[in-house]
Image: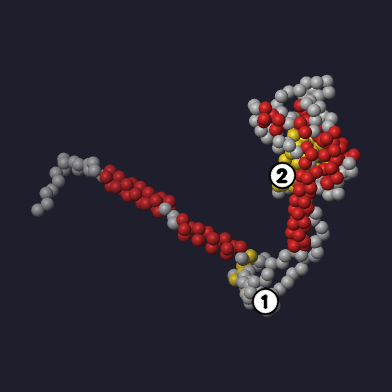
Amino acid sequence: MARRRRPHEEEHENTERWLVSYADFITLMFAFFVVMYSLSSVNEGKYRILSSSLMQAFRSASINAEGQTIVAPPVVVPTGPPVPVKRPKGHDNQGKAREQTAQKMRDMAGHIRRVLEPITGNGQVRVTEGAFGVTVEINASALFSTGEAVLGSEANAALRAVAGVISNSEFPIMVEGHTDSNPISTLRFPSNWELSSARASSVVRLFIESGVSPDRLTAAGYADQRPVADNDTEEGRARNRRVAIMLESRVPVGESEPDTETETPGAQAPTAIVPDDPVLTP
């Protein structure tokens, strides 16, 4: 039998009701973090596939004035054997021109070696052939007196013979003067810059007097800034005092014939079925 509450008895307050709200709050927080974690762990591969599909769809479709989407025609896929790549007819001519130029430079280098034999001694003359032409290096002692820029009689005759070899060619000619690191200070040559430039200019003037066209010639003095040996030894300084004559190889390129296209017999042109009217989708 239920016990009756006496009138003077008061109902006790429940102090554990906060647990209900706390449990609800913890449940909401758990759900929130689960959702956040699921959003942060997107499959990157699937995301890229979806992105590419959407971009392709929007690129191949446009919307007309009535709000309808116009689907582009299908892409044409070529069929049949590949069409050969056209090649300019002047390509073979350029290859022959390069071969002729290389052979001409080789012949000229051999001829220069022969005409420089009178001043060739103890490695004073070096003739080298490279990808861009022929370089003739002559030791300054074989051409000039110490501290001077006037060509000696023997060097004058040898260089005139070189001018006879190169005068009939069309190659540009660069003449460079070089010195060692020992400074010079005279009234005529205040530094090695003036001395190296004057020596290169002397060779250029001789070439012009011997029939070489002036528009092919260039003179430059580099003083001691481009050594080829160690300036700490007497042998190295003697090697650095030099005049370099460079014949630059340039392949003349003529006007090529118009390009022509050729097709392989039986080659089939690309075909595709294209609808008569664009496909309209609402």
Q: Mark number for residue 128?
A: 2
In depth, the one of 135 and 96 nearer the eye is: 135
Residue type marked 2: Thr
Asked whether disc 2 touches disc 1, contact meaning CB atoms under 8 Å apart, the reply is no
| Residue matched to label 1 | 267
Depth order, front residue of 6/132: 132
- The residue shown at (85%, 38%) is 157
Nearest to N terminus: mark 2 or mark 1: 2
Q: In this view, does 124 lie to the left or right of 218?
A: left
Q: Residues within 10 Å of mark 1 (few under 14, many from 20)?
A: few
Q: Where residue 113 sits: x, y (%)?
A: 76, 44
Nearest the eye: 117 or 19: 117
Q: Is residue 224 visible?
A: no
Q: Which residue is drawn at 89% across and 43% down?
A: 211
What residue is shown at x 78% (from left), y 30% (from top)? 196
Q: Give the distance between the C-alpha atoms of the residues marked 2 and 1, in whole angstroms.
A: 52 Å
Q: Is mark 2 on a helix, strand or loop?
A: strand
Quadrant location, the C terminus: bottom right
Q: Residue at x 68, y 69 (%)?
A: 84
Looking at the picture, does residue 141 appear above or below residue 263? above
Query: Can you name the residue that lies furthest to the left here?
Result: 1
Q: Is residue 2 above or below residue 121?
A: below
Amino acid type for the residue under numbered disc 1: Ala
Residue 17: percent from left, percent from top: 26, 45
SS at badge 1: loop
Residue 39 drawn at (x, y percent): 43, 53
